[in-house]
Image (spheres, coloured by chain):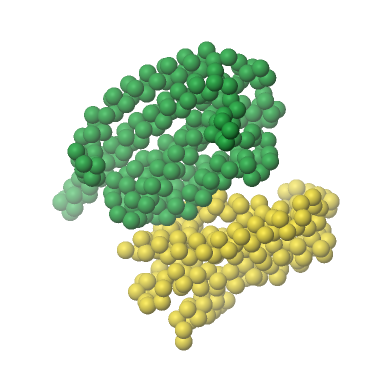
Amino acid sequence: MNPLAAILIRDMRIAIRVGGGALMGVLFFLVVVTLVPFAVGPDLALLKRIGPAILWLAALLASLLALDRLFTADHEDGSLDLILMGRAPLELVVAMKGIAHWLTTGLPLIIAAPLIGLFLNLDPPAEAALALTLLVGTPALTFIGMIGAAIAVTLRRGGLLLAVIVLPLTVPVLIFGVAAANAAVVGPVPFGTPFTILCALTLASIVVGPFAAAAALRQEME
Amino acid sequence: MPVTDLANPTRFLALANRLIPWLGALTLIVFAYGIDRAMLAPDDYQQGATVKIMFLHVPSAWLGMLGWGVMTVAALGTLVWRHPLADVAAKAAAPIGAAFTLLCLVTGSLWGRPEWGTYWVWDARLTSELILLLLYLGVIAVWRTVEDPSRAARAVAVLTLVGAVDLPIIKFSVDWWNTLHQGSSVFRLGGSTIDPSILMPLFVMAIAFTLLFVTLQLAAMRNEILRRRVRTLRLMQASAVS
């Protein structure tokens, strides 16, 4: 089998099986969204207004959850050393792991987002726009986050450090994701303006992320 | 002495030891002159005396960005040439750059209160500057988490290069987004929009701040080299005992 396809299938299997935590992200997403009305009060008009922002924030935090295991688990059981010695280019392997991570943590969020959006009193057009922005934006979160995951791979308390170094870098994605979701509903900017910038951010992070993460892994694992 | 000699930490220490007192004295003199000029500069016709905050705010903003610039160059030195002095330069620049960035945010906030009526707005320039501070703190966190200094340096180098995207965002944020912070007024096409009576003290203060940065950077690099030697000696001592 092609080594890259093998990595993709392996990572997805690990994520889906016991201890993988693929659905943990969705559960976390649901819990965070449920907490918000307790914090800001169950005012439906207010929730409708800040709903896209809450869902984006919850998606951002949920995508962080599994990130610290992205390379650490492989480092602990030694498979990362095999990957590094393997013939497949590390950048592509890392990109495949990113895709597997997104398919198991990002994609379930996008499927769940319209349902969870009902709790926040979102209208169908707003939910469609939100799902579309999440679909386009969450890969950027994975591919930016993998840089931090690679930097923190050998650390014992890597999870906390990961959040501290990754979250500031995800600010532009959050800004344009929420801006696009809001623009679709209330305006005044057309949906396309922030949405195309969001697409550009995702494409750029798909290019930069694997290279930076691979560089960090090579340096860390020496 | 060829420049490559500086790559030797011992030579660097000798040079730093000679330069630091002179640079410190020069910094003091330029600061004294700059503060004098700044105090004598006329008040703004609209802002009154609060315009003097600019003499602290603008140079510290520049140096906050210069600090990350130094770290970016050092990161290339770390990743490409594996040079230990580049690691030391990167580590030394982080807290200094963070301090200048914090100074920029604090002075800007104090200036914003009388002029804009608020300490903080989520303006593009302010937000990107705050992210720069968070990136600095993240880098410092990596330095403080990874025990082996050369491994920490390589991890920080990757993060520094990625974080460097924030520099152009800060610089052009006032052009790309039309928000509260004013646009470029010092370096712009068609000349500065600031009156020479205020611009001249600003440049003197910028030179003074830059000298301060260089002095602090050299001193911090010297301390870091000595700290690493102490660490190595301790490790040798510990392995000799056991």
- Front residue of A25/B139: it is B139
Q: Is residue A14 visible?
A: no
Outermost residue on the bottom side: it is A1
- Front residue of B8/A131: it is B8
Q: Indicate whether B144 appears above or below B114.
A: below
Outermost residue on the top side: it is B40
In x, y percent, where is residue A122? Answer: 81, 59
Q: Indicate whether A193 appears above or below B118.
A: below
- Front residue of B123/A197: it is A197
In x, y percent, where is residue B230? Answer: 23, 42
Please give the count of numbered marks on the rendered protein. 0
Chain in yellow in the render: A
Chain in green in the render: B
Q: Indicate whether B62 appears above or below B30.
A: below
In x, y percent, where is residue B199? Answer: 53, 23
Q: Is residue B187 visible?
A: yes
Name the residue at 56% across, 25% down. Answer: B54
In x, y percent, where is residue B140? Answer: 43, 45
Outermost residue on the left side: it is B240
Residue B126 lies left or right of residue A115; in this view the side is left
Name the residue at 46% across, 35% down. Answer: B63
- Front residue of B156/A48: it is B156
Quadrant in which the C terminus of chain A appears: bottom left
Name the residue at 40% across, 68% down. Answer: A75
Name the residue at 40% across, 55% down. Answer: B155
